[in-house]
Amino acid sequence: MNILVPGAGLGRLVFDLCIDGFNAEGNEISYHQLLASSYILNYSVGSRIHTLYPWAHSFSNHKSRKNHLKSVLIPDVSTGDLMTHTEESGDMSMSASDFLLLYGSKKQQDRFDAVATVFFLDTAPNLIRYIETVRNCLKTGGLLINVGPLLWHFERNAPGSHGREREEREKEIAIEIDSGKEKEQENENEKATEKDKGKGKEVDKGKGKEVDKGKGKEVDKGIGKEREQEKDPKPTTWGIADPGSVELTDDEVVALVEELGFSIEKRVFGIQAPYIQDANSMLQNTYRASHWVARKK
């Protein structure tokens, strides 16, 4: 059975599925997580060999300084040893790419028996695109298994708007600089350019090229070829970077999944799910996650 895990993070779920005998493929777009995952899975030489202090940089809500400076040893298992001693483990792979662009392609149609989305769906600016992509790469009768909250990552910060003010200011500065340079070189350009009035062409002495104003083409005299000045065609989609975002309720998410060609076979709400949480902290933030299983019709 082939299982896809989009938003695989450090790859623990992918690894566990592989140990259980499934062929698991993880997908992750963050190179920070991909690098850390690659090191643990491919280069660590044992278990409990690195010491981390996960709460050292946060000074609030600690019961004691001992708790504040508590350490943990990673990884908790030796991945190499576990794979070696597992008789019927599956194949494991990771892809570094935009989920929408890779798995929404024709090449990926009907590839997987199941897609496992864990704390992933709320990373979608447009959930419709996510579900359509899952449907594309999932076989008919395949399962979409989901668990997680709805902490919409792009709420109030839709793709295409991040850093827009800074970018606009940088463009204004660049235009001012270019304008100043153009004024300084105006006299030199006039001296270096001769106009052939009879042919309606302009000769740039500095480059040895003619510009045919009538046709809007540039002629390279040295090579004797004409080049149409064309812009590169724009892609039809930027994947997750497409502008716009929408935030849905849990009921709306389930209704959308059904509308896009799935039948809900199981649904549970309110699963207690701490996330990167210190169990001894004086402040406890815990998700009440939604879990459901949908089958592609």
Image: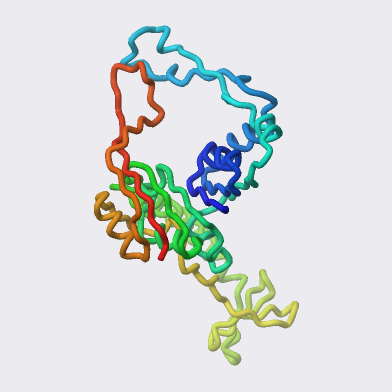
Location of residue 60 with respect to 295 vertically, above or below: above
Instruction: Return the residue found at the far right.
Output: 223
Vertical comparison of 111 with 146: above or below: below
Q: How many marks?
A: 0
Residue 49 quadrant: top right
In-image side of 102 versus 60 (left or right): right
Asked whether residue 176 appears in the rendered view, the answer is yes
Q: Observer-nearest residue: 113 or 36? A: 113
Q: Is residue 65 left or right of residue 259?
A: right
Where in the figure is residue 154, as x and y percent of width and height? 34, 48
Q: Quadrant of residue 10?
A: top right
**What residue is at 30 percent from the left and 60 percent from the top?**
256
The residue at the far bottom in this view is 198
Colour approach in the figure: rainbow
Q: Nearer the viewer, residue 125 or 7?
A: 7
Q: Position of residue 90 (x, y in %)?
A: 63, 45
Image position of 168 (left or right of 83): left
Q: Quadrant of the C terminus?
A: bottom left
Q: Residue at x 32, y 32 (%)?
A: 272
Q: Position of residue 248 (x, y in %)?
A: 26, 52
Q: Nearer the viewer, residue 93 or 90?
A: 90
Residue 285: horizontal and vertical position, in percent?
Answer: 30, 28
Q: Where is residue 42, by image quadrant?
A: top right
Compared with residue 139, is residue 205 higher up or lower down, i.e. above or below?
below
Identify the residue at image location x=29%, y=16%: 282
Decide if residue 169 is in sight here. no
